[in-house]
Amino acid sequence: MIKTQFSAAKTLLNSKDFGVLSTISVKLEGFPFGSVVPYCLDDTGLPVIYISTIAQHTKNITENKRCSLTIIDNNEDVQAHGRISIIGNMELLGDNHNAAKERYFRHFPNAKSYGATHSFSFYRLEPITVRFIGGFGAIHWIESNDFVSINPFAGTAEIGVIEHMNKDHQDAMLSYCQHFKNMAVSNDDEIRMVGIDSAGFDLFVNLKKVRFEFPEPITNAQEARMALVAMSKKVK
């Protein structure tokens, strides 16, 4: 049961790239403060955000790092579908987390220029517990230790797969979007792979994130190749 809860929660977290960050207000002491933030996942599967020192949520975190990040599955009836709240402490990332920062910029390349205007810093949400609701009656608490998932491709292996796909397999990624997601895309659209992990991979079609899940978890580049080739065969 724990594995099923974890898989469903992670699938939702992987599929999105923004959520509602709830911090404890400095201006209105004791009150919650909600804001929308983009995120991507680091090599442990935890959310990383990039925020300005002048933003209200950053001021709140500086005073009290306790917060939560809520991600909702987009649907007309939101209460009938998944949502996840990660509750924990927002920790400032140091200089030894360059891989997480580079991964963030692959997802959000326009964010590279933000620091030229205001001072921005990277933070990672360290969970204490996770609340996952998969729909009516499907309500679960997930322990933080069960929520961490190491990405076997973190670092150079991930970059190698991404560069190869973006350089040599644009047609395949276009076909994935058309066949598996029923998307109306063409060669005029910008399609780029930005990340891969044991559960699946992330594409961006123009500015929209598109998540693909593998049928079975993979652990190395050879298995990734086999999974991607199998997908290509299905679209022919």
Image (tube, helix red, strand yellow):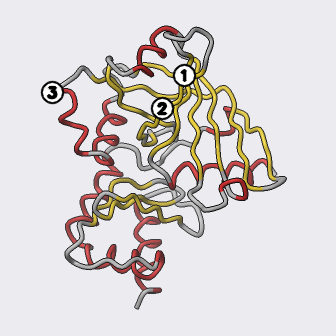
Local packing at callout 2 (Cα closer than 10 Å; few below 14, some 14-19, many 20+) is: few
Q: Which is more N-terminal, label 3 or label 2?
A: 2
**Which residue bears the numbered disc 2?**
35
Q: Position of residue 17 (x, y in %)?
A: 44, 48
Between 30 and 112, the one nearer to me in the picture: 30
The reply to whether dot 1 and dot 2 touch (C-beta < 8 Å) is yes
Q: Residue furthest front?
A: 28
Q: Earlier in the sequence, mark 1 or mark 3?
A: 1
Quadrant of residue 196 within the rendered picture:
bottom left
Measured from the top left, where is residue 45 in percent x and y?
52, 41
Query: Could you give the CA–CA distance between mark 1 and mark 2, rounded to whole angstroms?
Result: 8 Å
Image coordinates for residue 201, horizontal then vertical, percent = 44, 60
Residue 116: which disc? 3
Q: Secondary structure at mark 2?
A: strand
* Residue 117 x/y as whole percent: 17, 26
Which badge, 1 or 2, is on the more N-terminal residue? 1
Tag 1 residue: 23
176 over 193 or under it: above or below: below
In this view, which residue lies farthest toward the right? 137
Q: Amino acid at mark 3?
A: Ala
Q: Residue drawn at (80%, 52%), measured in percent from left and top?
A: 138
Answer with left or right where residue 36 lies relative to residue 131: left
Crowd around label 1: few <14 · some 14–19 · many ≥20 (10 Å): many
* Mark 3 burial class by Cα count in 10 Å: few <14, some 14-19, many 20+: few
Q: Give the residue type at disc 1.
A: Thr
Residue positioned 49% across, 52% down in the render: 16
Residue type pointed to by label 2: Ser
Task: Report the Cα–Cα distance between label 1 and label 3.
Answer: 26 Å
Tell whether label 3 touches label 2 (CB within 8 Å). no
Q: In the shown orientation, is residue 125 left or right of residue 115?
A: right
